[in-house]
Every structure is written in structure tokens, then in C-alpha cells.
Amino acid sequence: MKIYKAHILFTKEKDHFDVIENGYLAVADGCVVGIATDVSAFQAPEAEVIDFGDRLLIPAMNDIHVHAPQYRNLGIAMDLELLPWLANYTFPEETRYADPGYAERMYRRFIYDLWRHGTMRASVFATVHLDSTLRLMDLFREAGMGALVGKVNMNRNCPEALCETLAQAESACTALVQAYGGPDGLVRPIITPRFIPSCTPELLQLCGTLAQRHHLPVQSHLSENTDEIALVKQLEPESRNYGDAYHRYGLFGQTPTIMAHCVWTAGEELQLMQQNGVMVAHCPTSNFNVSSGMAPVRTFLDAGIPVGLASDISGGHDLSIFRVMVYAIQVSKMHYQRDHAKPFLSLSEAFWLATKSGGSVFGRVGSFEPGYEFDALVIDDADLNHDHYTLLHRLERFIYLGDDRHITHRFCRGQEIPAPHYE
Amino acid sequence: MKIYKAHILFTKEKDHFDVIENGYLAVADGCVVGIATDVSAFQAPEAEVIDFGDRLLIPAMNDIHVHAPQYRNLGIAMDLELLPWLANYTFPEETRYADPGYAERMYRRFIYDLWRHGTMRASVFATVHLDSTLRLMDLFREAGMGALVGKVNMNRNCPEALCETLAQAESACTALVQAYGGPDGLVRPIITPRFIPSCTPELLQLCGTLAQRHHLPVQSHLSENTDEIALVKQLEPESRNYGDAYHRYGLFGQTPTIMAHCVWTAGEELQLMQQNGVMVAHCPTSNFNVSSGMAPVRTFLDAGIPVGLASDISGGHDLSIFRVMVYAIQVSKMHYQRDHAKPFLSLSEAFWLATKSGGSVFGRVGSFEPGYEFDALVIDDADLNHDHYTLLHRLERFIYLGDDRHITHRFCRGQEIPAPHYE
């Protein structure tokens, strides 16, 4: 058993923070044993006590939608909308990942940057290439960080070099399950049809079959952009809506499912998500940058639809989930400004989305309740703390003003995670 | 004469960048002499050449609306709207600035943080207190950074301790003009009625008189929030709109005028701004955080109304004008998403707003054209530059992903500015 002493803040419930000033948090076998204000409560006099003094101890960040091979394109070409941006920047870059050497060089930087920003678990889109995807999974395993990694499925409306056959899709899935299919693995595969416009009905059907055959979760994109929605309507005329198209192929909650964006989800599509327990990956920075719109997170929460936060680089420009929290609150304030019946997200709600709610994708992750895997960050905010602030205001200031310089320790599943090597 | 060699990027026009790869920029008497790709063009063989190698040389940032005494409140209490936020957080904090010792401690940190983020000129709200305001001006002068500093005028709807008499307002103005009234000073006073709800008609009239008597510019707040606009309508029933209320007191373009926010400015108010050449301080982060709305910057630009960018801390949460650029583009994308007839801001437009357009408040500032004061930043983006990027993509990546760690040198009016001392 190890015991960490610090000011402990987390969100068991979305509506308020649990705040334990000078608390002790005990960890055994990678999981939280409990929290106490007196170390003797653990009746473990031999346990090592690590004292973080005046620092804050919070759950680590979870990023539930991020495109690893778009790392090079981060912060460029922000002048295009979704479909031309895919054609001109995203697809040409992803083509380079046929070369596992290039992939490894870029993926190492990507993982280092996730680590730097305090993200210990991510649900990741790779590319269509099996070898590079396996390399990405190896790198996550080496780093000791958690990931659901999707080898992307796609076979239409994209460059020839990014198209796969059905046979390739199936055999790649088998290879991924053989390599990383263990149920308790930190790194696991996730079925990842890119989105309806990139996949023929046959490929979508195969994806649904593979997800159910191997009990794998699913991730894709949903109702991000009005042009995209019109295109899907044309491609899938028999579906009642974009979500229903996934549903018909077994890709909408038949196994645990994350759908990114859902900016324009409403009506029957919303009901279907609710009914099927499909999770929203809310990507507010990306939705701004790609001119998509502002997703109605309060509506999702009111409907009991699960939601987590996501950077969606390189549609999003910032890997920091703390920054994404700020944007999520801001987007909700624009909905509130137009309709006061939709209260904006509180800080505790945004934090809960990034930790306990988003973390649920990875198991018992994102809280400090007993039995949760110990994923945590230690925050040294001394240089932000130049007057008298409450612990909650200190956390709020770190979220709004802080950066990677303030994160002094990172833990995933109980292990302290050192900086992953790159170059 | 000094000559700086680097990759030079700036925006003479809003619609495109001037990019000079491996350019030489000559400076004499604090001003830009010219730019050349061959150093011999300057015919100054004795001039010192400072070689910044592969780095970028860009104009420094201008922040045309920022509340220095709200520095302590940065990143806290983001759960309130404008009027309760003023009452519960802003006014209690500003009351502390009656103590020049407290003011100096906080103002030093504020100026250091402006410097850190590459902002070399700012148009600043202080508090109602003369002594603390003079101390703030002294600190800007000591730092070598440019500022328009406003001792705030207010005498109603606020705590007694923040109310002044008309006689105090007039004598304070005289003292500020005596101390800092020189026309070429880097630090100068600006008439600063807080906003209509905080000033009686008599005080507003006095502010207008003082501005014209001393040829001083004016700054205030306009049409930020719908509740505020309703309050002004009630307080000034004879005015045609919020802007017209300022106009009637000689505070709307009779001398150069900056109005912060203008989120809801339209119709006759917009026409009056256009007619009077009133400048908009666009504060997109603040407008999100305080649930105000999204200002129609494209409409202002189309109408020929001058616009600059502003952090508006602590309504805004980030002093970095680079971050404000990103937000300004994002806000314009949400307008574009609803109405494609309103093109979103290009990167060059956002950069121009932050440099040449916003800089115009301070004189010939914000460009590298001959005769402009040399306000500049040197950007070392080596750790962002891990593949082949164009110079424009390098600048875009720095704007979206970079931070103070990438700024290696800062210049204001030709002088290199070292880190201001604090604590």
C-alpha cells in the first residue's frame, strides 16, 4: 500500500466537488483503497507515505476522441470546413502512416504530448494501416498509459491508398484482438469505422459483426456538420437519421459506443442515443475550429445520455483537456445566453465530464472512490497562488490559467508515469 | 542603427501577411527604417546586426481593454453573469486598491504577466484611486512598456468606498495630466468612466469636458450584456441607444474613443460608431465567460469601424492576445456557421486586429512599415517545428499551440524589454 498526502479534489457526483484538505489517499494493487484525514485510519503503519505538501491531487484527464495521426497538422489550416479539410490536409497526412517509421516518430511525440497535458487515457483513431496501429498500441503500453486504439475502417470517398478491402479489415481486426484483446489490458482495440461517408454498407456491416463477435466497443463520428449530415442522408436514404444508419449496422450501442460531436443531434436521433446508451464525445474546440456549431450538452445530460470530453486534434487545436473544459463551459454559456432554461455547465460538471464520466469508457476510472483505478495528477500551483484562495478557486485557476508546467506527477493505474521518450 | 535578421512576418493589410524569409529589419530612434533581404541595402556597414537565425520576428501584441486590478480574480468565479459578478467579486477587490502597497504588489505581477505574454502596449482600467493609478503608470514607465492608463470614474451603483466626488474626479485628472500628459509619452492617461450605470449624468458630463479640455482619449464599456442594456435604457431614457448616451456627454468619438464589447451593437448605435470613428475592443473570451454573447466583428469591419483585440481580464481568463486571436476566429466561425454571408476571420485578419489595427490606439504601432515604432517579439518555435512547415504555418502553429516559453525577446519602441521585476 502507498499513501499520498495532498489537498484532494474530485467529483463523485457532477454537481459538487469532494474536497479533502490535507487528505490521505491510499492505493493498493493500482486502485484507490480510500481517503482519510488521519493516516491512522488505514491501519497500515508500514505503508509508505508520500507527502505532496500544499499541492493538489486530482484525477487524471481522459480524452475520449482524438486522432493520433493528425498530430502533425495541429494548429494549421484552420481556414477550412470539415469536408475540404479532410480532403486537403487529413487524408494526405494519414497516407504517410503507411510507413511505420514515420508513424512511430510522430506517435511518440503524440503520446509524449498527451502525457505532458495530464491525459492518462485516450480513445484514439489511428489510420487504416495495421502495422502503424500496432506500433501505436505498443507505444501506449511502453508508456504505461491507457488507450482504446482504433485501426480506422474506410473504403470509399478517400484516396485509394487509404482504402481497405473487407478481407483486410477482418484480418486486421483478428490481429489486433490477438495482440491486445485481453479484457483488463490498459491498451485495447476499438472498432472504428471512420464515418458513414467513408465506409460502404458492406464495410459498416462487417464492423458491426466484428464488434459483436469480439465484444469490442465502437467509436465513430455523428452529426458534426450540416453538409456531412446531408451527405449521409443521400448515402443512406433508408435510415431515419444519421444515428439510425449506424444502428442498422450494429454500431450504435449494441456494444459500448462513443460518437464524437453530435452537434446537430436532436429528435429521434437523440432518443435513439438515449435508448441505446450511446456516449457523446464532446469536442468544443474542434466544433468551433471547423465551423461546425455548438453541441447541446445540457440537453444530453438532461436526457441521461453519457458525455465525455475530447480534444479531437487536429480539428481541435489543444490536447489539454483542461482547456477543453473551459471551452465546454463557454459553449454551454452561449446556449444559456439564448435560452435561460438551459443552465450552463458548472465547474464541477465540466470536471466530472473530463474525469468520472469520460473515464467510464476505460473501466472504473476518473474518480477517487474506493475500487477506482488510481489515475491522478499532482498540481503545484504555487506561482498561481499569490493571494488567499480557497482550494476550489485554486483548482479553478489552474484549470483556466495553468498548463503542463504545473503538473508535477502523473499516475495511471497506480503507477507513476515518467515522461515517454521521443526522438 | 540596429539591424535584426530573422524570418519576418507582419500584416500591413488585413487580408494577407507580408512574409520575408531571412529578412533584415533596420531600426533607428526606436522606429523601423525598413526591411530588406540583403543587408547592404541599408548602406550602413557600421550598424550592429543581431541574427535571430531560424526564429520568427513579428509585431508585439496590443491589448486595448484590460482591468489591471482584476488580476487577482483571474480564473475564479466564472459562474456569474456581469452585474452580480461586479457586485460580488470585482468591486470588493477594487476596494483593496485604496492601499497603494497592495496595488503595487498586484500591479507588478500584472505587468510581468503582460510582458510574459508578449503584450507591449495596453489600454488599461485601473481603479477610482489616484495614488494607486499613478503607481501603475510609474510601473509601466519603469518597465519600458506602453500604456494608456485610466483612473476609473464612478459615483453610483457601487460600494461607497469606490465612489468619488466631482471635485475629486477633476483634481485627479489634473494630477494625471501633469504627471503623464506629454504627447509622446509611452504612458499616458485616458478618460475612463466605468460605464453608464456607474456614473451620474454630472460625472459623465465632467468626463466629456475633461477629455476635450486635455485632448485625452476615452475608454468605456458598451452593449456588453442584455441586462446591462436594459438598465442603461432605464437610466438614460432620453438617449436613442446606449452609444448615444455616451455621445450626449461628449464621450463617443469627440476625442479618440475605445468601447469594449459591443456584443449587441446594431442599427443606429452601429451607425453612430461608424460616423464617429469609435473603436471596438473585441473581448471574445470575456464575452463567453460572462455569458454575454458573440460580437459581430465582420459587421464592424464591413462598416469600416475600427476594431482591436482585448483580454478584458478578469472577465477574460487569459492575458495572451494570441489566445484571444484564436477565440476571435472561433466566434466569427459561429456567425459564419449561421450565415455564410459573414465570412469568418482569416488568420491574417485576426493578426492584423491584434497588431496594426489595435496598435493604432498607441500611435504608429503594430506594423513593420517604415516609421512605425519597433514593437516586436522574437519567436523560437523549434519545439513546434518538427516537420516541414511553411513560415505561415509555423506562425499559425505558434498562435494556436505556443505560449510564453516560445517568446525569446520582446521590444517596445525600439528597446529590448527585460522581465519586469516583481516581489
Image (cartoon, coloured by chain):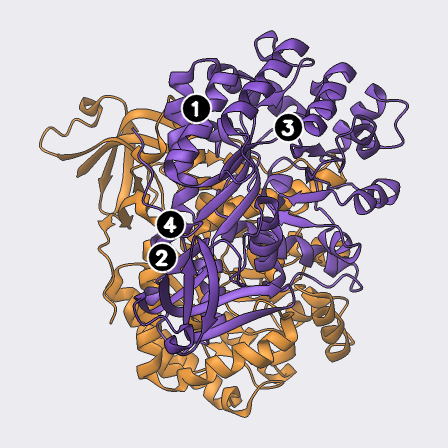
Chain colours: A purple, B orange
- Work out whether B159 lies above or below B274: below
* Left or right of residue A245, residue B205 in this image: left
**Cα distance, mark 1 to mark 2?**
30 Å
Image mark for residue A415: 4
* Residue nearer the viewer, A316 or A109: A109
Q: Secondary structure at mark 1?
A: helix
Q: Judge the density around disc 3: few (<14), some (14-19), many (≥20) Cα neighbours within 10 Å.
A: many
Image mark for residue A241: none
Image mark for residue A191: 3
Residue type pointed to by label 1: Arg
- Tag 4 and tag 2, C-beta contact below 8 Å: no
Q: Judge the density around disc 1: few (<14), some (14-19), many (≥20) Cα neighbours within 10 Å.
A: some
Residue type pointed to by label 3: Ile
The image quadrant that residue A90 belongs to is: top right
- Determine the chain carrying the residue at label 1: A
Provide the residue designation for mark 2: A406
User: First in sequence: mark 2 or mark 3?
Assistant: 3
